[in-house]
Image (tube, grey):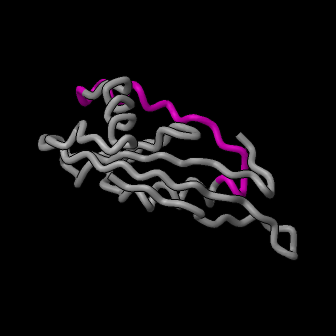
């Protein structure tokens, strides 16, 4: 996926607690591409890192399904948590799930460099 000036994208991220996990918690960006961090990255950091990367280069999905399955997590279950949480629900609450959605817009500065701004944020 390659962005251009004027593009607006929703970036959706979830983190959850994993008691058997040696790090703080896993974090997963689900939209617009898949990104995974096992290292306890906060949702807002994952979103910021992805937006910065999108300013500099075309981005593609990361292979995350195998990492999730190895740890006993199903992508379909996580996506269902996110859908529910974005509607104000409490899915995944027992697992400490936290969902963040940011609407970001991309711009060009006077030197022709791409940058981005968050327009809207929703967190549950």
The residue shown at (62%, 57%) is: 104
In this rendering, position of residue 45 left or right of residue 26: right
In this rendering, position of residue 116 left or right of residue 37: right
In this rendering, position of residue 110 left or right of residue 20: right
Q: In the picture shown, does residue 77 fall above or below 53?
A: above
In this rendering, position of residue 79 left or right of residue 107: left
Q: Residue furthest bottom?
A: 110
Q: Is residue 93 magenta?
A: no
Q: In the picture shown, does residue 52 fall above or below 77?
A: below
Question: What range is drawn magenta here?
Answer: 54-72
Q: Nearer the viewer, residue 78 or 18?
A: 78
Q: How many marks?
A: 0
Q: Is residue 71 magenta?
A: yes
The residue shown at (44%, 32%) is: 64
The residue shown at (39%, 31%) is: 79
Coordinates of residue 59 in the picture (x, y in percent): 66, 43
What is the quadrant of residue 117 in the picture?
bottom right
Q: In the picture shown, does residue 10 fall above or below 111?
A: above
Work out whether residue 120 can be spotted: yes
Q: Nearer the viewer, residue 90 or 18?
A: 90
Which quarter shows the N terminus? top right
The residue shown at (51%, 37%) is: 34
Coordinates of residue 103 in the picture (x, y in percent): 58, 54
Work out whether residue 38 can be spotted: no
């Amino acid at each position: 996926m390659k962005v251009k000036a004027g593009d607006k994208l929703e970036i959706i991220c979830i983190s959850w607690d994993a008691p058997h996990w040696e790090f703080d918690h896993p974090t997963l960006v689900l939209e617009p591409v898949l990104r995974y961090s096992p290292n306890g990255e906060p949702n807002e950091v994952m979103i910021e890192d992805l937006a910065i990367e999108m300013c500099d280069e075309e981005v593609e999905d990361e292979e995350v399904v195998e990492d999730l399955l190895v740890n006993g997590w199903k992508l379909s279950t996580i996506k269902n948590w996110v859908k529910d949480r974005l509607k104000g629900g409490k899915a995944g609450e027992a697992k400490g799930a936290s969902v963040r959605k940011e609407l970001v817009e991309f711009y060009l500065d006077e030197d022709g460099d791409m940058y981005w701004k968050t327009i809207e944020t929703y967190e549950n």
